[in-house]
Image (cartoon, rainbow, N blue to C red):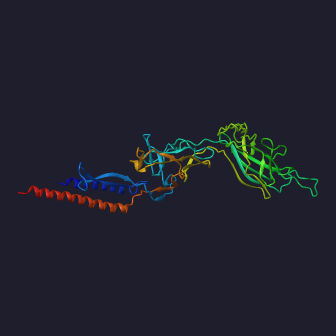
Amino acid sequence: MGFQQGLSGLNASAKNLDVIGHNIANSNTTGFKASRAEFSALVASAIGTSGGSNIGIGVETAAIAQQFDQGSMTITGNSLDVAINGNGFFSLTMPDGTPAYTRAGNFKLNEAGNIITNSGARVMGVPVNPITGEALRGADPQPMVLPTGTPIPAKETRLITAAFNLDARARDAAGDPLAAPPVPATPRATYGTSVNVYDSQGVATPVTLYFMKTANPNEWGVYTTLDETLQPTGAPPFTVTFDDSGKITGPTASHPYTAVSTAGFYLANVTPTNNPNLTNPLNNQTDPMNHPSVTDAGIFLDLSSVTQFGTKFAVSDLTQSGYTSGSLTGVNIADDGKIVARYSNGVSRAEGQLTLASFRNTQGLMALDGNNWVATAESGPAVMGNAGEGNFGSLRSGALEESNVDLTAELVNMMTAQRAYQANAQTIKTQDQVMSTLVNLR
């Protein structure tokens, strides 16, 4: 009797209902990927049989296949929410130290400063260059941690970057009293600007820069004081020069962060005037990039963006690289995966960059609790990379990827599975009636 076929059909239909129920239950789970039950026929075979004489003996569940279609995105506005649009998984380290992967980007910040998932897994990324903010290519992924417990230390100024225009129409600042009519001297404060620099303890010291046109064409003297008896500041020569097109030509020196020669010079004898604990000039600083060709000669004044055109003196940019101590006030994940922290001292800087993982066969990933997956031999090893590069998808900060479950389709599938279950039960009932008829033959 064919009870086997009906029994296998009942088991297959029950598993199908389990999969459908699991999908429906997770229709609101962030980053969830739906599954489907896939079946195959069971056929009894024997040596010597051919053609269509083999008897089918039912059905089996061949696989529970995951569907990694893209889910819809919901804008949340939460600074720690991030969604993947396209290929890739966030890389995690589980509480037991094992690697895992997820599509759910609803991250949290715990009391220790770790960026974690709801299941307590730590989110992985790569460190960034503290100067340029760019990810360190080839670095091993590490847990992303923000300084929530203690303030970030002060950073002494190593670089002042200036961008302004010196009026090409300016005359010799010394004037000409013998001219007719006499040309008065130009006050030193006519072309001046200032910026605060920071010592190693984070105390600000103002640095004022004055520029005075010399008697030589396209040449300006540089001063840091209004005292007329003092000479231009910085390393010799004490002047800046321009070519006939208004582009700066000198002096040049090695940039403290890149070791590339550029227009500018080191300021000498910038003394911390507001800090009684430090009396030595700010010219003994450690080069953070450890470039052997750069001397610790003081604060470098980068003048590569300074011009000399026939318009009024105007400062378009004046920044410096130092800051005082500050506490964490906010964090945001940028679209390229950079984790940008904001501090009470006004500094915003990248503290790391999220890494994404890709797999040759995503169907081979094994699902875990907490909406996570782990790599298997079928999936192949994880290939790490950054968002938007190669075959990796892009990121959307302040958004979450919804479950890709089609609730309407699942309800229809559930009705179909229910009918299949009832039909298989009916075959068993019919076989039972046939059996009873045979037993009751007289």
Query: Depth check: 91 or 199 in front?
Result: 91
Residue pictured at 27% horizontal, 60% vertical: 418
Horizontal placement of 215 versus 53: left or right? right
Q: Position of residue 438 (x, y in %)?
A: 11, 56
Q: Is 10 on the left or on the right of 243, as rendered?
A: left
Q: Quadrant of residue 429?
A: bottom left
Residue at 41%, 44% (x, y): give it: 377
Q: Which corner quadrant holds the C terminus?
A: bottom left
Q: Position of residue 189 (x, y in %)?
A: 80, 51
For the N terminus, the quadrant is bottom left
Side (left or right) of 98 relative to 178: left
Instruction: Work out whether residue 26 or residue 326 is closer to the camera in this orientation and state it.
Output: 26
Circle count: 0
Q: Please state if 106 lies on the left or on the right of 352 as rendered.
A: left
Q: Position of residue 26 (x, y in %)?
A: 38, 55
In the rendered view, tell whether residue 255 sits above or below residue 401.
Answer: above
- Farthest residue to the left: give it: 442
Q: Picture coordinates of residue 243 (x, y %)?
A: 80, 52
